[in-house]
Structures are given as structure tokens and as C-alpha cells.
Amino acid sequence: MTTGIDLQGSFIKSLIDLGLPAGAAKAVWMPVPMVLMLIGATVGVLVTIWQERKISAAAQQRIGPEFMGPFGLLSPVADGIKFVFKEDIIPAKSDPWLFTLGPIIVVLPVFLSYLIVPFGENLAVTNVATGVFLWIALSSVQPIGLLMSGYASNNKYSLLGGLRAAAQSISYEIPLALAVLAVVMMSNSLSSIDIVEQQSGYGIFGWNVWRQPIGFLIFWISALAECERMPFDLPEAEEELVAGYQTEYSGMKFALYYVASYVNLVLSALLVTVLYLGGWESPIPIELLAGWLGISETSPWLEIADASLGITMTVLKAYFLVFTAILLRWTVPRVRIDQLLDLGWKFLLPVSLANLLLTAALKLAFPAAFGG
Amino acid sequence: MDFANLVDQLNAGTILPEGIVLTTLMVIVVGDLIVGRSASRWIPYTAIAGLLAAVVALYLQWNNPNPISFLGAFNSDDLSIVFRGIIALSTAVTILMSIRYIEQSGTALAEFIGIMLTATLGGMFLSGASELVTIFISLETLSISSYLMTGYTKRDPRSNEAALKYLLIGASSTGVFLYGVSLLYGLSGGETQLSAIASAIADANLSQSLGLVISLVFVIAGVAFKISAAPFHQWTPDVYEGSPTPVVAFLSVGSKAAGFALAIRLMNSAFPLLIDEWQFVFTALAVLSMVLGNVVALAQTSMKRMLAYSSIGQAGFVMIGLIAGTEAGYASMIFYLLVYLFMNLGAFTCLILFTLRTGTDQISEYSGLYQKDPLLTLCLSICLLSLGGIPPLAGFFGKIYLFWAGWQAGQYGLVLLGLVTTVVSIYYYIRVVRMMVVKEPQEMSDAVKNYPEVQWNLPGMRPLQVGLVLTLVATSLAGILSNPLFTLANSSIARTTTLQPIVISSHFSATVPAENSALQTQQ
Amino acid sequence: MNLAEGVQLVSFAILAVMMIGSALGVVLFSNIVYSAFLLAGVFVSISGIYLLLNADFVATAQILIYVGAVNVLILFAIMLVNKREDFKPLPNAWVRPTMTAIVSAGLFVLLSTMVLVTPWAYSTESVSSDTTIVLIGQHFFSDFLLPFELASVLLLMAMVGAIILARREFLPDQVITPDKQQQPVLTLPERPRELVGISSDKTSNLDDSRRSE
């Protein structure tokens, strides 16, 4: 099997050819994937916001943004510019330090989590051995920021929103982690790249979603709850809490929350892709296609095609999931807080435990199919 | 390492008694969940049956030729078997006395017994743990269950206060203990098994390093908290006063026995190089405990508080055996703990009975009890006199053996102090007995005047009666017929290999005068 | 010194300053909410130090458990009961902090002397961070099997206990009977001591709240 395109190797090699010492060449390379990933995440958010507007409009039989760029594509950019120029208000009697720190703490771990999202064999920032576990740990930091801004706003709706957000995030982290654990058990690794590789080889039939249908549903429900998407957006339920922990925020700080929630949504969709939908693998394995067309697997343009196909596939699958999330927003009513916690603790938790046990049993019984 | 090979190496049969306790625990928790409230009829008896089965299983493992199990994490030698037996027995007796008490306080019985069994499990594992991580986890199992039980009557501010105090002080002492243990891990270059730690430290010539001494002090602080030795005793009176009385009974016997087992194993296996230092620290602890416990107990007006201070003093007496460091010393510790099990639990059973009938535990309210309830008076008097060490009773022989062992090892000052404080302790024990027996009918307290008719057929009273009679018989007979207990204590020490080398080395280094005196007595 | 070592040194310096600074903040701030937030800073810096020690799994677990669970629970508790109350300033209030400072400084000097004096047994084998998870798993199922399994019993009972302490009891109305033995539910059967007694030791002032019935 080919190892795919090796951007890092060729980049460093070309720098060394230009006369740089090897250490410096590596140091030059290091920030490149990070910056690329940051830009990618931000562009991803802009696309998602546009998508959200268009699909919401379609769900309500409107047209949506139309005049800002072709199909209103530039409307998220306009939003961003508006946020930048808004006045940054810090309410009187609030705690200015915590008030400012809150949104930063919420945003940072989300962007950091992109560290583990792979777009191809070698197209990831780095292959972290603790992979998905790192993501779970990082996403557990978010509630601190939410509590912080809820407390600092000195507003009871904010505090309630912050507390709700933290409670929700803690409750749904457990089924989420248990669902991930079942996948990890099948692939014998926490690394996101290994998880995708374990699903490769059989095209669409090799994906984990067939072997982990319950886990897939649990993961997607919990991920939506973690992102505070619509059926579970209680922390900012506008009828009850004005806007939850965001009530007092304006300008760039509000934008940070806005961005964080959308980045988180895209990230969750990407992780569902990685864990259950075969990551960068296309539904028909590319080796098979190459074999049919009689092209050598090592030809350079096939490698490039493979890499771009990988990125396209990952993004396509992720945006399909984002699409379903947006549709859910306009079709499912919001749950009550006690229903939300009941669902998390009394339904998802036992089901995910059972799923874990079932996976372990299947792994013992059919080691070939379940990654023995 | 393949699976079958690993199972062989684990030698998991040694934890069969703990397995029985754990199974009982699961049966109780799940059974209560399925059956509901009516389950409280059979749950305590199941628990007692499980604990007695565990004791039988322990007996069958006596003199196990291959005691090391779980790749060195657990050592099921005879020493640990005796201590595990003491802990399991103390829980069984405690459950007998807790049924009525818990029902009358309106709390859930099944959960209480479940937590109690978990504490027992922690204590039993602690008695045999010979590896730092196992020691820590079992210590935490014991401690956290104890915190939970302490706060079990949650509507009572005294219980809340007790639980919070116990939790905070316990957590900080655990932190200190953990720091000391981590120093051991570092000094030995990454070993967690006690014997490996000792040899690694000896190999690295670190035996007199500052790090080892600090680690010793920190570890002793953690252990002294568990056995509530002064000056780590501050939690004891408040916790004893605010906790449900069966919990106090368990804390003063089972939990303390586990603490002593830990002390013996840790000091002998991990700190053999610092034998003088740890004996010195424990001497200080013993002196403080004996003096403070017995003197402050004089001023108490509540029985529970008085027994709290008395238990501090008793811990001081038991430490004499540990300091002696000889085979006789350890054997006398075990013997005394066995006797203490019956007499202290007997005293607490009487306390519970009196409290349930009158709703008070003030010492002054006991006056004239003899006229109304002779059996209770007899049992409480016997247990208290035995705790004080009055001759024909079991406590006397336990104390004599302890002091004899201490004297043999050359701890003259300590033994003399022990004798003096014993006399002090007899005063406050006798005070209660006098209050109950001697008073004229017109001096009877209000509580005793309104004493309800003695009814043994109320739900939960029968087991209390059984416990009362059992401890009464054991306390009065164990002294005269003490030979089996004596042999048990001695043979458990004689067959425990970890204690042997250290006894020899202490003969060579620390207790030369003791050797001389021993020789003189032989001549 | 190559690039990697330089980066390690700088990161260690940053993490150490961050850890000590926020730990001091935890102790010294009078606002308990600040202390709780700074505690998260301490935990994050500790996890960074674990990373520098090639213990990536422990570092991640540290963030997940201490920052994500323990600290959030602490914050929850603080925010649910955060009652602003102005305490009367005690006379000689400076004595306690001074004593604490002296004791802590003494302990610090003692421990740092110990660290410097002791010839530590360094482990020379290099640790590869790729296999940490595998190694931890192997230990859990061989020589640390017993504590690993015992921890599950501990957690089970801690959960049961937490539920017992936290659950709301639906108490039936107390039947008012002339029977004096009837004690209020979920309390100790012993009567609290009288405050005016001759008892020698201090009595908790919580007692009188119960005597009202």
C-alpha cells in the first residue's frame, strides 16, 4: 500500500537543497501545517455560517442571503467585519479580567483540537499517539471558560447559562468517551490516523459505521450536545435565559463565542468522519480504481490525486454531517433541562456501556472483523 | 506472557476471603436494588454470613506455603490473615449492633451495610498489601467508606460536622502519606514493592539520607492518623461524637486494626534500615497517646467522647508492642487487638442499647441503671473493667502480655508510663460502673426513671442481644481461656517471614540491653 | 544545545513560573472564585510538565480529570453556594498568616534541602512516548491488577455514597406521638448536649439549631 503524499519530507528536502541547515529547515516547516490548519478552520466556519443561513432559509421557504457575493457567499465575511468594528462593552460591576479570559479559554481548546484531524496519510498536523483521547480532554476544558464568563458577567441569566453549559458538557462527555472507546478498542490505537487506516481497504463497506451503528448514533447525539446545537442548546435558550452566558458579550468577544461554537461543530463533524465514516477514504478504494484503469500505484500524479481526493472526501463527509445538524435545528424541538440530563445519564450512558461490552464480546468472538 | 501463564503467576486464590466479601457486597447492592425496601430483612444476615464465610476461608488459608500473590502486590502471610480475620469479625459484630440503630434513625440499611462491607474490604486488603499502589488504593477504600458512614445521618448537624472534619483532616493526612510514599518510590529508583524498596535503598547507600527520614516521618503521620495516635488524634472525639455509634465501633476496632497492620508491614518491610528512628517516633506517639488519651478521658461527660479518648489511650498501649519490635511484641499486639475487638465492641453494643432506649449517652444519665436493666449493666461493667485491665478479664491478660513484651525489649520507661496511665484509665472506667451500680434508687437519673420495659422482640433487637451476649462471654472468658488466642497470635508471628530478619537485626543493633536482660532472666 | 533541548528548557521555565505563580494565587487570593480558576492553571501547568517528561497519556488524563472534572465540580460547588458575607475582622488577624508562612517556609527549606542533598537514583533508560499507553495497559493487567480492580470497588461505593448523601429524601410527615423515643428521621438518636453543661471541651454551636424542636 502506498504511504500517500509526503509533504513534510519534500518541503524540508527542497529547503535543504536551497542551502538551509536541516534543523532550520525543520523549524521553518513546523508552523506551516498549523497556520494552514488555522486558516482551514476559519474558512470552514465561514462556509458553515453561510450554509446555516441558506439551509435555514430553505427550511423556512425563504431565499436567504443573496446580494453579498454570488449566492450571498460573502455574508459571513460581512458579519465578521461588523463584529470587528463593534464597540467592546465590559459591563459595569462585572469582573473585567475573567470577562475577557472566558471567551479565550472557550476558543483555544477547540482550535487546538484540530491538531488531531487527519486529511490523509501524512496530511495531519502531527500524529499524536493519544489522538482522540486528547480531543476528549481538550473539549473538557471548555466548561471552565463558560463558567468563567457566566460568573464574570454578574448577571443571573449568564450564571445560569454557564452552569447549564457546564452540567451539559460534563454529562455528555461520558457517553461520548465511551462511544469513542468502543472504536478505539477495534482499532487498537488512540491515534486518529490509525483509526482511519483500520477502516481502509474495503471502500464504503469497511467504515466503522457498519460495525458501530449504536456507537455512531451515541457519538453524534453527544457531539451535538457538546456543541450546544439546537435540540440541546439550553445554555443559550433565548426564551428562558436571554442568551445564556453570552448575554453581556458584544463585539469581538461575542464573535469568539460565535466562532468557537461553529468551529466546534465542524470539528465534531470531522471527528465523526474520522471515527465512523472512514476519514479520507473514498467509498470506492482508489487502489481499486487505479487497478481498473491500469495506472501504476506509484505514479506521482496519482499520489497528488489521492491526496486531494482525501481532503475532498473528508470535507465532503464532514459537511454532509453539518448539513444534517442544521436540518435537525429546524426540525427538532428543544428539550427541557431535566429531559436533557435524563437522556444523558439514564439512556445514553447505559446504552453506551452496553455498546462497549458488546464490542468487546464481538472482538473476542470475531477477531478478524473487529480488529482482534 | 500469555494469559494462562499470567493466571498462574497471579496466585489469585489468596484473596478468596476478600472475594467472598466482595460477592456479598454485590449481592446486597443488587438485591436491594431489585427487591426494594423489604430486602432489609435479610440483608444484614447475608452480610454476616458472608463475613463469617470469609473468616472460615481465612482459616483454611492458614499457613499458606505460597503467600505472595498478584506478582507481589498482596502478601497473604499469617500476619495478614490474623488482621484480616480481626477486621472481618469486627464488621460482623458491628452489623449485629447496627440493624436496630440504623432503622431507628430512618436511614437506608442496605447502603449502610454496603459501605461498611467496602470499608471492610479496604481494611482487609490493606492488611495484606505489600506494594505501594495497593496500599494506597486500599487505604483510600477504607477511608472514603469511613467518611461516607460518618455522615450517614445527614439531617443531623453533628453528623455533618463529623463527616466534614474527618474528610478534611483525612484528605490532608492522605496527602502527607502520599508524599512520603512518593519519596520512597523516588529514593528506591522506581520500585513499588516494599521489599524491593528496602533492598534498593540499601544498595544505593541511602539508608541515612535526609530523604528517607522525611519519607518515614510523612508515612508515620499518615498511619498515625488511621490509628488516631496523639498528636494526630484531633479528629477522633468530634468524629466519634457525631457519627452513628456502629460506625464509631467499626472505626475504633476494624479501622484501627487495619492501621496497625499497615504500620507493622510498612515499618518492617520498607524501613528496616531506620529501625531506631521509627521506634523513636512511635515511642513519642505512644507516650503522647497514653498520657493525653487517658487524662483527657477523665473530663468527659459523654460516653462516646469518653470512649474516643479511651481508644486513643488504648492505641498508645498497643504501640508498645510495635516499639518492642520483637516477636513477642508483635504477638502481644495481635493478642491485645483480638481481645480489644470483643471488649470494645461489647461496650459499644451496650452504649447503643442504652441510647436506643433512652435517647442519650451522657454518663450522668447512667446512674442507677442497675435497678432497671441488670443485663445491660453487667455487660457494660464487664467490658469497661476489661478495657481498664481488671484481673480476671481478657483486657488484663492482653495488657500484661503487652507490658511483658515491652519490658523484655527494654522499654522500661514506656512500660512504667503504661502502668501509670492504666491506673488513670481504671479511674474513669470505674466511675461509669459506680454510677450504674452503686447509686440509690432516689438518685436515679431522669432517663433511667423513664426507662422503657425491656423488650427483645422488637425488630432488630434480637441481633443486638446476640451481639451483647457474645461479646460478654468472649470478654469474660477470653482472659481465663486465653491459650488458643495466645497460640494463634504467636504462631502467626512465628510463621511470618517478613518479620523474621528484622527481629534478628534488631537483636543485633537496637536491643542489646534487652538481650542481656533476657539472658539474665533465663539464667 | 540543539533546537529541541532549547525548546524544552524554555517550556519548562514557562511552565514552572506559571505553576508556582498560579499556586501562590490559589493560596493568596481572598476571592475563592479566583482561587478555583487559578487551580485550573496549576493543573494545566502540571500536565505540561508531564508532557515534557514524555508521559503524554498521563498529561492528557490530568487535563481530562483534574481540569475537566475536578475543577469544574469545585467551581460548580462554589457558584451554587457563593454567598457573599462580610466577616468581622479578627483581632490579631495577622498572626495566623504569619505563622502559616513561617511553617510553610520552613517546610520548603527542609524539602528543598532534602531534594538537593539526596543522591537520587536516576533511571537511565530513555522513555519512548509512543508506547506509553501500551506500557500502562500492560501494568494494569499484570502487576497492578489488584489495585486496578480494587479502584473499581472504591469508585462504585463512592458513587453510591455520593448519591445517598445528595439525594432528596421524601420524608413522611412525622407522626406526633407522646412516645418520647420517636427521634427525627436521619439524625442521631443521642440528644445533643446542653450548651450550659459543665462539659470541659468546647461545644459546637450547631447544637442549638436542633434543640428548637
Image (cartoon, grey):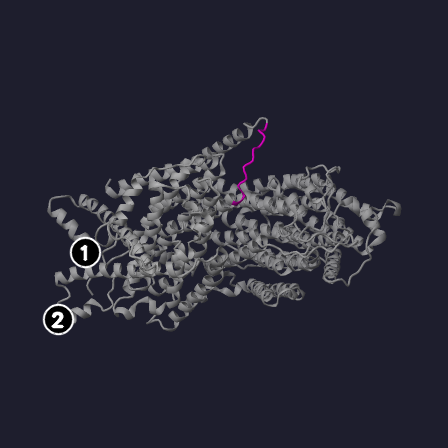
Residue B220 visible in the picture:
no
- The answer to which quarter of the image holds residue B58 is bottom right
Image: B345 above or below A370: above
Q: Nearer the viewer, residue A34 or B349?
A: A34
Q: Position of residue A309 (x, y in %)?
A: 20, 61
Which of these two is toward me, A322 or B448?
A322
Between circles 2 and 1, the one closer to the viewer is: 2
Q: Is residue C157 magenta?
A: no
In the picture, the quarter occupied by the N terminus of chain B is bottom left
Q: Horizontal and vertical percent for residue B179?
A: 48, 44
Callout 2, which amino acid?
Answer: Gly
Asked if labels 1 and 2 touch by Cβ distance under 8 angstroms, the answer is no
The answer to whether C190 appears left or right of A58 in the picture is right
The disc at residue A21 is none
Say whether residue C81 is magenta.
yes
Packing grade of label 1 (10 A; few <14, some 14-19, many >=20) is some
The reply to whether label 2 and label 1 mark residues of one chain is yes
Q: Residue at x 55, y 52 (%)?
A: B499
Label 2, label 1: how many angstroms apart (C-alpha)?
23 Å
Task: Tell me the magenta residue range.
Answer: C80-90
In the picture provided, is B71 more to the left or to the right than B238? left
User: As shown in the figure, which amino acid type bears the numbered disc 1?
Assistant: Asp
Residue A32: percent from left, percent from top: 21, 47
User: Which residue is under mark 1?
Assistant: A6
- Residue C25 image position (x, y, % from top left): 44, 35
Q: Earlier in the sequence, mark 2 or mark 1?
A: 1
Element marked by disc 2: loop
Q: Secondary structure at mark 1?
A: loop
Q: Which residue is mark 2?
A: A294
